[in-house]
Image (spheres, rainbow, N blue to C red):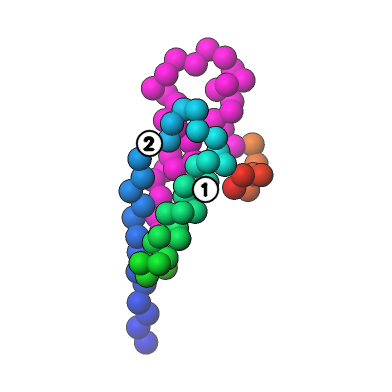
Amino acid sequence: MSRQLTVAAAQMGPVARAETRSQVVDRLIAMLNTAHQAGATLVVFPELALTTFFPRWVIDDPEELESYFETEMPGNET
């Protein structure tokens, strides 16, 4: 018995520092829909799909730094 699986690798641009989590999730959902319409049954996103790569900036404010980390999964936006 064989099973066909169509896999899509999501190639996404960077997440801007000012982009909200909700904006990012909306973009990911749009990419999922596009992949589904192309026949994909599994979509793989990069490891930093939900947040910007924050180490490229010096962030002295602990509250701002904490905002990049999830406190629960799934969260309100995810």
Amino acid type of the residue that numbered disc 2 sits on in the rendered structure: Pro
Q: Main secondary structure of the magenta part?
A: loop
In the foreground, 21 or 60: 21
Q: Position of residue 73 (x, y in %)?
A: 62, 46
- Tell me which segment is drawn in magenta: 43-70
Q: Describe the element under mark 1 as helix, strand or loop.
A: helix
Q: Is residue 2 left or right of residue 50?
A: left
Q: CA distance from mark 1 to mark 2?
A: 14 Å
Check residue 58 for magenta coloring: yes
Task: Decide: is 5 above or below 50.
Answer: below
Q: Position of residue 4 (x, y in %)?
A: 35, 77
Whether residue 73 is visible here, answered yes or no, is: no
Residue shown at the point (50%, 42%) measured from the top left: 24
Amino acid type, callout 1: Asp
Is 46 in the magenta? yes
Depth order, front residue of 63/16 = 16
Residue placed at 36% from the left, 52% from the top?
Answer: 10
Q: Which mark is residue 26?
A: 1
